[in-house]
Image: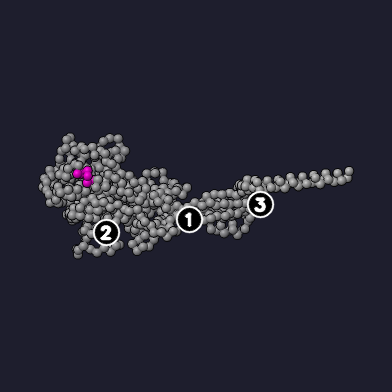
Amino acid sequence: MQNWRLNLVFLLLFLLGAATVGRLVFLQIIDHGFYKAMAQGQQNLSSFVKGDRGDIFVQDKDGNLYTIATNYSIPFIFISPPEIENSDATAAGIAEVLDISEEFIVERIGRSNSLFEVLKKNISDKEQAEIEALELPGVYVGKETTRLYPQKEFASHVIGFTNQDDIGQYGIEEYYNDVLEGEEGLEISATSVGGYLFSDKKTPKAGADVILTLDYNIQVQAEKILKDTARALKVKEGSIVVLDPNTGKILALANIPAFNPNSYGSIKDLDIFQNATLQKLFEPGSVFKPITMASAIDAGKLTPDTSYIDKGSLTIGIYTIKNYNERIFGESTMSEVLQFSINTGAVFAESELGHSDFIKYIEQFGLFKPTNIDLTGEIYSQNKELKKGYEINYATASFGQGIEITPIQLLRAFGGIANNGLMHTPYIVEDVKDTTGIPFERLETQSTRAISKRTSSQITSMLVSVTEDGFGKAARIPGYYVAGKTGTAQISNSALGIAKSGYSDETVQSFVGYIPAFNPKFLVLVKLHNPQTKTAEYSAVPAFKELASYIIDYYQIPPDYTP
């Protein structure tokens, strides 16, 4: 009887042991993955992090770099509530240093299920040092990275900015966003059995640095001259662009009104963010006449000495075209047409060329398509109204009215005139530096021929006569041949949002010029919206001369002759 009871006890113990072993096998082997994942889910927090965004630089002629976009860390104080040992003492210590209420801190400490509670952002160095000196368990100093533009408004339309999600908006920040932004990585923050926070982070790859073609000193000077001119002449909007016609490299690009990308959120008028050089159309006026003249001469229909009789006006259907101030010049050569900006002379040149060839040359000058500059948001006009074939449209387009282009399109076209007939795609990024050390290879910039080398030389001579003997005399710089053309164009009512046909009393006044004329080192466009002067001779031309004189001295360009 006793043996039976003993055997029963042994059997029960054996079954209990077997059940226990079986359960352990089930938990630790069969369902091991499930319970491991559950534990990790309770103890681990994961988040994606990015490497630092690349910096943006400009340089000067000597290769010195200037930072215009970078990153900086903002320190902040946070707590991990499960790690706090003494709530009242911790709250009192923090409150005294950070000048925030103890009640606020105690409430945050009470969130025991949270591992991360921010108490104060953007703390000072003194606050950081004092918090660290307290050595309070569960109290930490964190770093938040944000974008900084140390030069403030400098080249703001070129740079753009990054939004709250660190994504580029406008300018270089948007166009080269994929190059500048860092690669994502995974950061795992975990809690120990006791609830303490620790982390394991594999640093992801940082974004590449971008070096622009802008020359720091020329950009500074262009912005200063533009602001001074705007202040003196009450200019609403304006642009100055400097380009190397031999390469397409942009040396300066300035627009007003500018903005501070550090505080882009305070800007109410979003139109300010647009880069007027490539995102706004305008009717160029008389600066377009050299393109009409170059086309007619290149086609063999005219020479610089071809003459016609100017009567001061001409009639096309119900329309009458007049010269500025209704002046009558009588017998005039094509050189004099540019010298004195004769509207009827431009119409004569276009009629001699022929409408179909006129359109063909405009296409060759790239004025019906974008330039493909490496900046975001470029627009262009197909000029459908001009292409309808009405006689009056061809006539007015010959002197730059009724045809819409962007300043960068105009600059590229003039680059073709200055550079022996060859146009280059304008570009604004010189180099990209990343951690791979692989040299930056720019997509091949397009070079297209607009006119022959001979025509280029002839038009250049005609444009020199504009500054020597014509309406561009104010652009003359002693010792140098300056090629250039003025333009004063009325702004259409529709462009100003006025619901009626015709043109307003407001004007766009501009000047395009290059120096030295027969071996150009730089090409400048000055464009001003409705300055308080009658013509560009008194607004855009002085601004051009001041900037051109500076660049000549800065580059130490030898003179063409002794004055």
Q: Amino acid at mark 1?
A: Lys
> Where residue 556 appears, x then y in whole percent?
28, 64
Mark sitting on residue 489: none
Residue 20 percent coordinates (x, y):
73, 46
The residue tagged 3 is 193
Q: Earlier in the sequence, mark 2 or mark 3?
A: 3
Q: Which type of secondary structure does the marked residue at label 1 adopt?
A: loop
For label 2, the residue is 521
Q: Look at 24% across and 55% down and name the residue there.
A: 419
Element on which disc 3 rests = loop
Query: Image check: 69 left or right of 336?
Result: right
Q: Which residue appears at 14% of the width and 50% of the height?
A: 303
**Dominant secondary structure of the magenta stretch?**
helix
* Start-end of magenta stretch: 357-362
Q: Which residue is mark 1?
A: 205
Q: Is residue 369 above or below residue 98?
A: above
- The CA distance from mark 2 to mark 3 is 71 Å
Where residue 298 appears, as percent x and y from the top left, is: 18, 50
Are there few (<14), some (14-19), or many (20+) residues within 10 Å of tag 1?
some
Image position of 342 (left or right of 146):
left
Tell me the quadrant of the picture where the C terminus can be found.
bottom left
Q: CA distance from mark 3 to mark 1?
A: 32 Å
Q: Quote the CA–CA distance across marks 1 and 2.
A: 40 Å
